[in-house]
């Protein structure tokens, strides 16, 4: 029984660390492909971008534009503050620090990567006025992944209900996927930009979960 408990105590941090490393490796490969001007990636970006562009002027496109606006930096700050307040009201104050470390730290990392790589935006975004920063990785998508991914992770480590855990993960995937789709539909990002944003957000979130869980379980 003692051995089983010890195995359980290290499983979550180890799994989270493995996820972080896998996401980091995938992001590195994608960044190398972007920097080298990989023709296959460029064709993939262009094809998906054209396919989604037709949605832009439809009601669905307008809804996605609203969703994108909500997940701009100020919106993410407000949503994170609301999430922290919710945790406080639920008397789960110990989870506020991991949430803030994940969202704020990950957003800073993504900003540094964006300005280090300096990939230009798709040409159309200048006309639409939907973005003014560099393109890779997507900040909106990274921030959404950080916020919703962390909240889902907090549910995963805090519940024994498989249904609740699956629901939290599914909801996080749905929200992040919708934000990612919105950025491509608006012409603000290449598809590879939003994938990179997901990978950065996932890597940082998983690393934070691994660190905080290891500290919590060693205490």
Image (cartoon, rainbow, N blue to C red):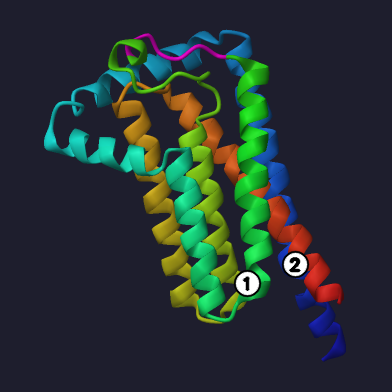
Q: Residue 213 has which mark?
A: 2
Q: Residue at the location (19% across, 29% down)?
A: 55
Q: Quadrant of residue 11?
A: bottom right
Near-viewer residue (87 or 182): 87
Q: Magenta residues?
A: 119-124
Q: Residue at the location (41% across, 68% down)?
A: 167
Residue 123 painted magenta: yes
Tell me where residue 190 appears, x and y as whole percent. 43, 21
C-alpha distance separating marks 1 and 2: 9 Å
Near-viewer residue (127 or 53): 127
Is the residue under label 2 in contact with that under label 1 (CB below 8 Å)? yes
Instruction: In the displayed orientation, state which residue is furthest to the left.
Output: 58
Q: Magenta: predominant secondary structure element?
A: loop
Q: Residue at the location (54% across, 65% down)?
A: 84
Q: SS class of the residue under badge 2? A: helix
Indicate the quadrant containing the C terminus: top left, top right, bottom left or bottom right.
Answer: bottom right
Residue 190 painted magenta: no
**Residue under label 1:** 157
């Amino acid at each position: 029984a003692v051995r089983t408990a010890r195995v359980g105590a290290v499983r979550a941090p180890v799994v989270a660390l493995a996820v972080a490393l896998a996401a980091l490796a995938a992001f590195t490969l994608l960044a190398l492909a972007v920097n080298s001007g990989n023709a296959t990636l460029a064709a993939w970006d262009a094809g998906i971008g054209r396919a989604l562009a037709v949605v832009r002027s439809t009601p669905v496109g307008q809804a996605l534009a609203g969703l994108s606006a909500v997940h701009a930096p100020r919106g993410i700050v407000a949503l994170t503050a609301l999430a922290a307040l919710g945790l406080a009201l639920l008397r789960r104050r110990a989870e506020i620090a991991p949430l803030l470390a994940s969202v704020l730290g990950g957003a800073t990392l993504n900003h540094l990567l964006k300005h280090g790589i300096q990939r230009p935006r798709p040409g159309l975004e200048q006309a639409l006025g939907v973005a003014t920063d560099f393109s890779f990785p997507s900040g909106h998508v990274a921030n959404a992944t950080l916020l919703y991914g962390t909240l889902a992770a907090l549910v995963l480590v805090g519940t024994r209900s498989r249904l609740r855990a699956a629901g939290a993960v599914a909801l996080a995937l749905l929200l992040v996927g919708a934000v990612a789709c919105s950025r491509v539909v608006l012409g603000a990002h290449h598809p590879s930009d939003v994938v990179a944003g997901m990978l950065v957000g996932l890597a940082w979130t998983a690393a934070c979960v691994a660190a905080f869980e290891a500290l919590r379980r060693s205490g």
